[in-house]
Image (cartoon, rainbow, N blue to C red):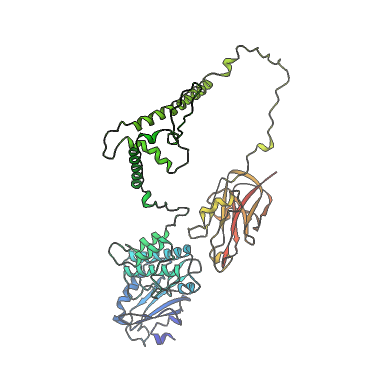
Amino acid sequence: MTSTITGLPDRYRPLDEVGPTETTATGVIHCWRAKDRILNRDVAIRVHTPGGPAAREWITRALTAGGLATPALAMVYDAAEGSGDGAASGGAAYVVNEWIEGRTLAERLAEGPMPEREARTVLRRLAEGVAAAHRVGLAVGGLSPETVVLRPNGLVGLRSVPAASGTVQGDVAALGELLEYCLTGRRPGTAAAGRTAGMPPDLAALVRRARSTEPGAGLSSVAAMAALLAERPRTGHTAEPQRAPDESDSGWLRRLRERRDEERAAGAAEDVAVDPAPTRDASGGAYPPLDARSLPPVPGRRDEDDEDDLLPLLDDADDDGAPPRDDGAGDARRRRLLVVGLPVAALAVVIALAVWLGNVISPDDLTGDQAPVPSAPPSSAPPAQETDDPGDGPALTITGARVYDPFGDGDPDNPDEVPLSFDGDPSTAWSTVTYRGSAAFGNLKDGIGVLYDLGSEQTLTGLGVTGTAGATAEVRVGDQRDGDLDSYRVVASGELGDPADLAFDEPATTRYVLLWLTGLAPSDGGFSAEVAEVTLTPAG
């Protein structure tokens, strides 16, 4: 197809037709990849047939989009309404967009659903771009798996900006459908779409809110959706277990009250000792009767016997708030409390008194009756000097660490797992995320690492690293906590192993040690690396 057929200026030479055809109320929009002859660059050019007044609204929307500058939306380079004569040069209505290189979202999802982390990142970045358009009064429209492109650098872009028409609520709903598609692989508009089963609970709720049209139930804006996608799900948190209905506070107290009523109905005979023949003391007198409920509870134990400990509290006040009753059962309990409690209290007083006397009376006060110890005669020899034990120096320890990701997108790989790389347990590890397509971090960046803080300057001769075999790394040292990569000089390099000894060519004195991963190993259909344990090799 040539520019004379489409009615385009000679500046643009169409190469091949791409993307879906968009049918509007005023005509049809076709999209081509084309060459800008003047600037010698590829562009995406969309042509509205017919041109002229029928395309005026679309061109107005394109001019509004021309003021946007966000990587999530293709930039608008040029736009013209045309005369309506598609055969004449300059007669077609067209919009020239930035050409976004990469795979479409539909091509990526043909391989299967995305991991939750990747889906969050893709939709968050896309939502942030759409929110920027909404802030200037432009509803983007045209959000579909064929127009969303995954850039090679890890970013995301919408190729056809803007669509012929669109609404803010339509953009919200379309983003919700794309999120569901990324997580489940169920394409929007199919019979299988619309079910959130199997999705993370917070994202399932977000999809439902994006699709909802009920007042107060939907999302207020795309910006709100982007903010919710940016929130990380909390880890290590488990929901508080639900109590059975009969174990609620009211049910538990009701059971206690019922047991109290049963005891009162049984009479004072229920409160006598369990053993009918009480033990007698040396004088022949019988000890007062005891039962198991008068003994103090065992720490850490909770069972139905503990309910008996609360029965006296219920006895002291009736359900209607009446004054406590003075019955024989209460007197028996008080007698048992005195018999058991008084000896325990006396023993506690004796122990406290002994401790106090031990602290008040100094050992020097007891030496008056002892013979004086003769002092050693003076000596002319100088006192011996204390010598430092070579082993008394500060131990080489790691006081802190963080993910070092200067070429990333601001979302570092598994930052909460970094302490596992120096916790002394090789069975736990920090790991990168899984990158697709290449062991060179999916061609997204040059590397990633962990920066270890030794607390103060220490002299090292090497680093022991237990990690993924086949992954490669450099050991770098420096004196800055937040320097760029070049501020840390390379002192060793090699492959990780079980373990790998990355020895330095010469000792290095440093406070900060950077383990910089330069290559990943195959893992789960992609590439990743783990660092299970890092040990410092001291000099000397």
**Whether residue 111 is situated above or below residue 220 in the rendered picture:** below
Q: Closest to the observer: 233 or 175?
A: 233
Name the residue furthest front: 277
Which residue is found at the position 41% from the left and 61% from the top?
201
Residue 475 in the image: x percent, y percent? 62, 54
Residue 372 in the image: x percent, y percent? 65, 12
Image side of residue 299 versus residue 512, left or right: left
Image side of residue 11 versus residue 257, left or right: right
Which residue is found at the position 30% from the left and 67% from the top?
213
Quadrant in the picture for the N terminus: bottom left
Quarter of the rendering containing residue 88: bottom left
Q: Closest to the observer: 453 or 425?
A: 425
Q: Closest to the observer: 44 or 518?
A: 518
Q: Closest to the observer: 484 or 393?
A: 393
- Residue 79 seen: yes
Residue 140 in the image: x percent, y percent? 35, 70
Which residue is found at the position 70% from the left and 23% from the top?
383
Q: How many marks?
A: 0
**Whether residue 319 is situated above or below residue 170 in the rendered picture:** above
- Residue 102 seen: no
Residue 148 in the image: x percent, y percent? 43, 72
Quadrant in the picture for the C terminus: top right
